Image: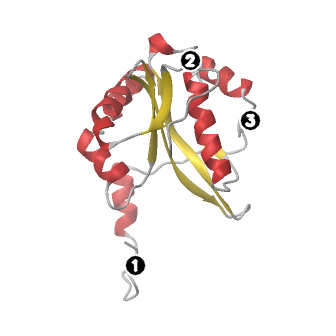
Amino acid sequence: MSTFRCHAMSSNRSIRPARPEDAESIVAMIRELAAYEKLEEHAKATPDVLRTHLFGSRPAAEALIAELDGQTVGFCLFFSTFSTFRGQPGFYIEDIYVREPQRNQGIGKALLATVARLAVQRGYGRVEWSVLNWNAPSIGFYQSLGAIPQDEWTMYRLHEEPLARLAALAPSSPGTPLS
């Protein structure tokens, strides 16, 4: 990915791919996002964990950094998915965040536009994300871009103990390991 300068943004604002040295800033913004969403107890990411999973030998996700005058003011973390119905990959945005003082300046839109551009360039069929039902400002913003809520789907999650319990039920097989 190359640095992206959005036409709607002045030349002192840019979107660029995250680098390993951005891990501390990303973790700080994850904690700010968790506080905004009232989910602080769930924010366990560390810079080392991000360096491993974003920049290690087998990256699990990608991230973009929004900068204003050389300062990090936002990020977007996303990863590839695959639609069996479409027979085509897509992106899932795990988190997008712009710091409070820099909101309403086109930075969030530029982050989303960059992910959309990457999806189109790679031949991906869609970009998806979730938003908390109470987050009216974000919902309004997403709808203004043409995003459509998927009300007919309910997201499910396994984590911590239920995840470990289910994993323990997996059959042992002499076949090829999945890793």
Q: Does dot 3 land on a helix, a strand or a loop?
A: loop
> What residue is drawn where x is 45% and y is 47%?
62
Residue 37 spot, x, y in % from top left = 45, 24
Identity, as a three-letter code, of the amino acid under mark 2: Ser
- The quarter holding residue 84 reads bottom right
Residue sitting nearer the eye, 86 or 19:
19
| 20 on left or right of 98 | left
- The relative height of residue 18 versus residue 90 in the rendered view (above or below) is above
Q: Mark 3 points at which residue?
A: 148
Visible residue check, residue 131: no
Q: Name the residue under label 2.
A: 10
Q: Foreground mark, 1 or 2?
A: 2
Residue 117 spot, x, y in % from top left = 64, 43
Name the N-terminal-most of marks 3 and 2.
2
- The quarter holding residue 105 reads top right
Crowding near the residue tagged with mark 3, few <14, some 14–19, many ≥20 C-alpha atoms within 10 Å: few
Residue 158 spot, x, y in % from top left = 44, 51
Q: Name the residue under label 1.
A: 171
Crowding near the residue tagged with mark 1, few <14, some 14–19, many ≥20 C-alpha atoms within 10 Å: few
How far is disc 1 from disc 2 in space, using C-alphas?
56 Å
CB under 8 Å between callouts 1 and 2?
no
Identity, as a three-letter code, of the amino acid under mark 3: Ile
Furthest toward the bottom, the residue is 174
| 27 on left or right of 135 | left
> What residue is drawn where x is 35% and y is 33%?
26
> What residue is drawn where x is 58% and y is 20%?
9
- The quarter holding residue 27 reads top left
Q: Foreground mark, 3 or 1?
A: 3
Q: Which mark is residue 102?
A: none
How far is disc 3 from disc 2 in space, using C-alphas?
29 Å
Visible residue check, residue 52: yes
